[in-house]
Image (cartoon, helix red, strand yellow):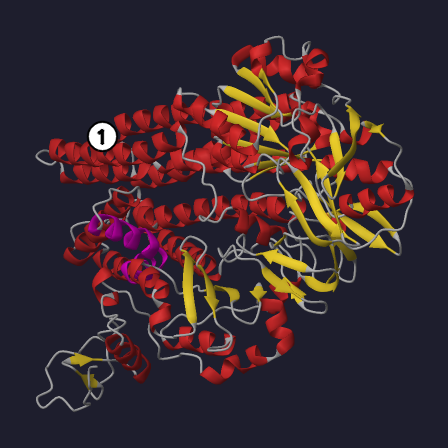
Amino acid sequence: MATFTQVHAPNPPLTQQTCFHCQELCPDERLYTDDKFFCCEGCKMVYEILNTNNLCQYYILDEKPGQSLKNRRDARAFAYLDDAEVQEKLLEYNDGHTAQVTFYLPQMHCISCLWLLEHLYKLDEGVFNTRVNFLKKTALIQFDPAVTSLRKIAALLASIGYAPDINLADVDQARPKALSKKLASQIAIAGFAVGNIMLFSFPEYLGMDRVEDAWFARVFGYLSLLIATPVLVYSARDYLVSAWNGLRNGNLNVDIPLSLAILSLYFRSAYEILSQTGAGYLDSFGGLIFLLLIGKWFQQKTWNTLSFERDYKSYFPVAAMLKNGTEETSTPVNRLVPGDIIVVRSQEIIPADGLLIKGSAKIDYSFVTGESDPVLVHAGERIFAGGKQTAESIEISLTKRVAQSYLTRLWNDQAFKQVEKGKISRLADRAGQIFSILILASGLGGFLYWAPTSMATAINAFTAVMIVACPCTIIFSISFTMGNILRILGRNQFYVKNSAVIEALASTQAVIFDKTGTITQVAQQSYQFKGAALSFSDQAAIKSLTKHSAHPLSRRLYASLPALPTLPPEQFEELPGLGIQGMLQGLQIKIGSAEFVGQYGGGQGVYYAVDGVVKGYFEVKSRYRAGLSQVLAFFRKKRSVWLLSGDQNQEAVQLAPYFPNPAHMQFNRTPQDKLNFVKNLQDNGQEVLMIGDGLNDAGALQQSNVGIVLAEDTNNFTPACDGIVHADEFDKIPQFVRLAESGVRIVKQSYVIALAYNLFGLSYAVTGHLSPLIAAILMPVSSVSIVLFGIVSGNLRARRLRLR
């Protein structure tokens, strides 16, 4: 372990030192350690902490990684985090051994920040891991509450320069994100500067003689330069830092041409003003930064609006069983409020935090923490949103509302299925780099061409090319167009994980349907028992077991039996694709397929066995969903259509009109068979869309390129799927696919428009006749027009498809 000795520099250097941690100027040289100067005790302390824990690579990854800690918050400022009620609001999960919290860290700005935060466990042994979302500036931290605490972690983050921005009002109330204070101040400074610079430039605009009025020209020029400097240092900082980081990492990003234009305008202007050889281009410089930031604000505002509607106004089309006395009613999750009692059956996801009040809970929290071992929860203990019940049904008293944004974030976690980028996304990534190279080459070529004859024209040509070309329009196109499509689909009760799913949905070549609960309407199925008449105790046993299952057949069978008293089963177990079993009053009860109960060679139906003796089976008569013929006909035009069912083939005759090719109907398929079938199609080069109920086909849904779960007043949300559609909207699936295809076409059209704009702008800019100010106006206008084109086109297409 390193030791530190604080001494005074024996011979103070003539130049003022910069802080080793934050690179700001040191007020003096009192703080001196290991040949390194520091501006304050805070920066010195951070260095010592990092050095002691062998984390000084933090200073290598970025040129200026640290934040000044002169005004750091005292650790006592986080004392309120020890309050149990505050922890209840902030902690997303806490079982006594593992707790989870997400902090917003606005100071995060570079790869060093990312690296340090992901190594937080080295600074606090109670921290298990940290997952950082750099774009949202959030850190999800999992820790052991017995070793460390929320207060200690917040204080630690503050001590190393990342004080969490905690606003408890944001926890209680969802609202659209406001304009960030930093962006607002950047716009304000740039707007103030450009207005005043243009005011100072009026003599130039009116034809002032620079020789006769040299004093005015010199004073106004100096004032303009003074006002423009904060614009360069502060308002344009994000573009310059992004360009520098791109160069350091070997990535030619879209901010490099912009940064060259900004720097060339500023320093050329500074040279002309200081040498009294011209008036410079500071009005164009200030206008460029101001308009760029206004465009950035418009993009941020539009994106926040789309994201807010998706996360808070359109809910997963799933329902929970709300208990009111002895009655249970299916209720959409967005209507649940704290104090409601819900019933959660086997294999169902818990939609919101609550307290267990009845039943034996074995909760699989792999959706939340990544750990799949079930956690045993006792009555009165807390249960967290995102967990999955793996035993019999339980009753939970909710303590929080359903947090749509939280479930969405879990759904998109990298631990679960990730849809690969589509062709247009990959094209956007590649096109941005190609455009950047083209812009740099065109700008340099224009400069070299005009430099021998007119340096002013050469400067104009170079800066205009750097400014007017806008490779970022390609990125905006896919982000905003697909973001709007996600919002429209959510309004129509089709909730999609992310924009990559839309691309994948549009390019699928094979479609697989599950049968029970997918193309059949479970609520209208009829059951007739074949075998000896069921006694009162038999009916009570069947009802007692099916009560705890979320499978559509179990739910329908439970509802079809008369109102009878039920008993809590012992050792309840649900085996996907087979059936359910449990012990009731010492008897082993099995309900499921013929093979599951031991009736080998048995036919179609739901079999019932007691202590190994098969007493008969329920014959199921299915009714198919309205619009099934139209849905299948739509897919057959361009795709191969398949039916995979775990049932026997007794319904093959009834299904023949829907599936004319007998080879495309496969029965008696286990969950593993379904998964293997999807793999075989993919091995043959086909992209697969799987539509199921998420119960017996979770593996196939996860393996498919796009997996969609059909929800029918049930809580069958599963992280294995890519989309959830309410059963009432089944007949709209063709419209959803058409909208996805339209979204891809709109993005491609946007690419063509962006390419045409850039080629036209470049060809005119290299002539040297396009002023930097006009180029600065055209650049954000092009970005805004592309965004509006994508959103308006998507809305019009949705209306033509009769979608809300």
Image-based side of 211 in relation to 621, left or right: left
- Relative to 310, say whether 797 is above or below: above
Quadrant in the rendering for residue 224:
bottom left
Q: Residue at x 35, y 30 (%)?
A: 427
Q: Which portion, as a residue range, is magenta?
A: 225-248
Return the x and y of residue 479 as percentages of the image width and height.
46, 38
Return the x and y of residue 333 as percentages of the image width and height.
72, 48
Q: Quadrant of the N terminus?
A: bottom left
Image-based side of 191 in relation to 360, left or right: left
Q: Residue at x 41, y 39 (%)?
A: 780
Circle 1 sits on which residue? 766
Image-based side of 411 in relation to 315, left or right: left
Quadrant in the rendering for residue 764:
top left
Q: Amino acid at mark 1?
A: Val
Q: Residue at x 33, y 74 (%)?
A: 68
Query: How many other residues sit within 10 Å of disc 1, few (<14), some (14-19) or many (≥20)?
Result: many
Please identify the dominant SS of the magenta region.
Answer: helix
Return the x and y of residue 238 as percentages of the image width and height.
34, 54
Task: Identify the element where label 1 is drawn.
Answer: loop
Assess whether residue 402 is covered by the magenta stretch. Answer: no
Q: Quadrant of the C terminus?
A: top right
Image-based side of 709 in relation to 210, left or right: right
- Relative to 5, say whether 19 is above or below: above
Assess whether residue 235 is covered by the magenta stretch. Answer: yes
Q: Residue at x 26, y 53 (%)?
A: 245
Of residues 33 and 791, the one nearer the viewer is 33
Of residues 549 and 297, the one nearer the viewer is 549
Return the x and y of residue 234 as percentages of the image width and height.
34, 60
